[in-house]
Image: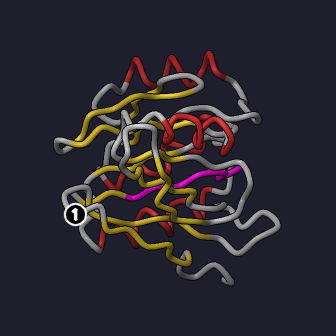
Amino acid sequence: MKICIVSDSHDNRRLLVAAVSDAKACGAQIVLHCGDLVAPSTLPALQPLGLPIHVIHGNNAGDLVVLMRMANRRPDFIHYYGQDAELSLAGRRLFLVHFPNYARGMAATGDYDLVCCGHSHEASIEQQANVKGGRTLLINPGTVAGVDAPPTYAFGDLRTLAFSIRSVPHAGA
């Protein structure tokens, strides 16, 4: 299963849609949003793309009541978890959280195949050693909104755990 990972969209619908559109064109079947969506009204812009989105809030939480209501009205589209999420997709165990220090701690447990975070606006893909003697993939997709950094997202395949950081197309437009 190919996925798109975004974070820190900060209400920038245009760049969020551009990133998810690009990922969908490359075969993405699902979107993970690692927080700082801010306004829930940003999400309907993604609905025409037809990909379900799993979202947590970050430190710029926006209106969480509206986000919860939207998720309840559109359960096939929006999956809202709160401050963090534990998911099972394509036989893989995933954990989403906004803060990198929390993400590092969760990756260190060895309980997950992939841990995703945001907040720093610094895109990175790392293999972190865990207490079970293995390594856990830790991804921060950067800021899809381009806040104090180039707009980026992560794209990859859960089957192979091969991921890359991609620039958001048309970011300069």
Q: Which of the image's four quarters has the C terminus?
A: bottom right
Quadrant in the picture for residue 158: bottom left
Q: Is residue 100 left or right of residue 72?
A: right
Above or below residue 173? Residue 92 is above
Q: How many marks?
A: 1
Q: Give x and y (percent) for residue 92.
A: 24, 43
Check disc 1 and report the residue beneath it. Answer: 160
Mark 1 crowd level (few <14, some 14–19, many ≥20, 10 Å Cα) = few
Amino acid at the residue labelled 1: Thr
The residue depicted at 62 percent of the width and 66 percent of the height is 123
Q: Over which residues does the magenta segment extend? A: 4-10
Q: Give x and y (percent) for residue 48.
A: 36, 53
Q: Give x and y (percent) for residue 112.
A: 36, 38
Q: Which of the image's four quarters has the N terminus?
A: bottom left
Instruction: Pick whichever, 123 or 36, lies toward us.
Output: 123
Q: Secondary structure at mark 1?
A: loop
Instruction: Pick whichever, 141 or 130, lies toward us.
Output: 130
Residue 111 in magenta?
no
Q: Is residue 137 left or right of residue 102?
A: left
Above or below residue 9? Residue 52 is above
Name the colour scheme.
secondary structure
